[in-house]
Structures are given as C-alpha cells and as structure tokens.
Amino acid sequence: MLSIDNLKVLGREVRARLGLRTYPIGVKFCTEPCDLSGFKRPRDYGVRMAVCQVINISRVYGWPMAFTLDDMFCMGGAYLFGLTPEYPKFLEEAPNWHTSSDDAKKYIMQRFQERALPQGSIKAVLVAPLEKITFMPDVIDIYGTPTQISAIAKALIWHGIFPETGFIGLSSCSFITNAHKTRKPQINLPSSGEVAWGRTEEDEI
C-alpha cells in the first residue's frame, strides 16, 4: 500500500513525465469532523464556491483546500458529495436546462442520483496537490490534455484496468464521487458549469 510519502513522489513524477500544467490532486471524504486548520476554505475569503472551483484552485495554485456545506453555493455538488442533510428537490429541475428530451431528463437524473454519496454522510472534504498532501486520499483527480489523459488510460489498460466514462452534460464533479463509490477510474469531459464557474480550460479533460 502506498504511503503519503510515496504519493508525494508519485505526484511529482506523474506531473513531470506527462508535462501536466496543473497538479494532480487528492480528495478525501471526511465522515467525521476533521481538523481543517491547515487548509484554505472559501469562507475564509468571504465567499461560497462550487466543488469545481475548489478543485481548480487547488490544482492550479497548489493550495490545500477544504470545504463543508457552509462553504458551498452549488447545491448539486454539495448533494453529490454527501454534504446536504436531505435531498434538494429543486435539483429535479436541472435536466430541463440541458435537454428537451423527456427520456434524456430521466436518464440524467438517474445517473446523477446514482453518483451521489449518502445524504449527510460527509462532514468535510479535503483537497490537496499530491506533492503536498498530508492525508491519505480516497480519490486522485488529474486534469490534462486528451493526449496526456490517454497516456494514463493506456497505462491502466496495460494492467487490465479499463477507465469508465459516462458524460451526462452536467455536474462534472459527479465523476469524483462515482469513482469513490465504484472504486473504478473515470474519464470525464468538463460540463458547462465547470467551464463557466470552475474556469476549466477548453483543452482539458
């Protein structure tokens, strides 16, 4: 099993060998209250953020970040990450903004809800570059160009592991929770929300 020191070395090596523009990051779901003193939080800056914004700040600037429900303005992400005590019913309207097909709306909601962690099961989420990580992550998240991510996918396939994909057009962060739930690697395209709010670059997946 990898140690935290191993992960730091791995993070540096992956970033260097692939020429990644941003840091590979680790994500941890805290099921109990945890110490957030070494992490920057959105509320420290007097704002609330979406999950994709926190992820991008951490991977671009190299900052250890943390968030709880109090830090979130995107309730879709908060629900997916198990932070909301109950299901926000207004989320059922979200597919109407993305498709005119009734069948597609049902499919989107089904996949969206399947990827969510149990309601209220998570107290806080930690996010940090692997190179600076101080915790054992539940999920590793890497952004890159299609060529860079393809190289990672090919490496996994060499070992008999096939990444999954399942783009639904919204809530890109659902791939993080889905990876955690299924224990399987995921490849994802940024959704419109992540591009608009998270500022993910147009050539990144």
Image (cartoon, rainbow, N blue to C red):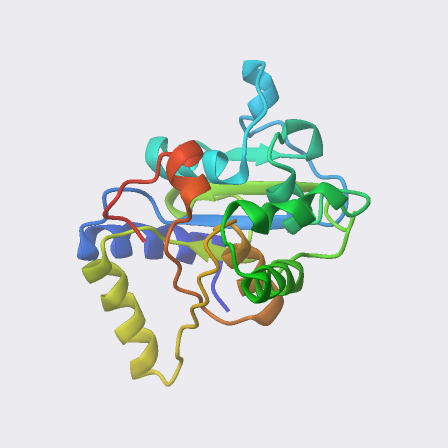
Q: Is residue 115 above or below residue 28?
A: below
Q: In the image shown, does 134 or 146 lie closer to the viewer?
A: 146
Relative placement, left or right, of 19 versus 168 is left
Q: Identify which residue is drawn at 42% across, 55% down.
A: 7
Q: Identify which residue is drawn at 67% across, 35% down.
A: 68
Q: In the image shown, does 10 or 57 lie closer to the viewer?
A: 57
Q: In the image shown, does 5 or 77 lie closer to the viewer?
A: 77
Relative placement, left or right, of 118 versus 44 is right
Q: Residue furthest right?
A: 86
Q: Is residue 13 above or below residue 124?
A: below
* Occupied quadrant, residue 201: top left
Q: In the image shown, does 7 or 150 lie closer to the viewer?
A: 150
Q: Residue furthest bottom?
A: 160
Asked whether the viewer can see residue 137, the reply is no
Q: Give x and y (percent) for residue 28.
A: 58, 49
Q: Give x and y (percent) for residue 147.
A: 19, 61
Q: Give x and y (percent) for residue 186.
A: 44, 66
Q: Identify which residue is drawn at 23% across, 59% down.
A: 146
Q: Give x and y (percent) for residue 187.
A: 39, 63
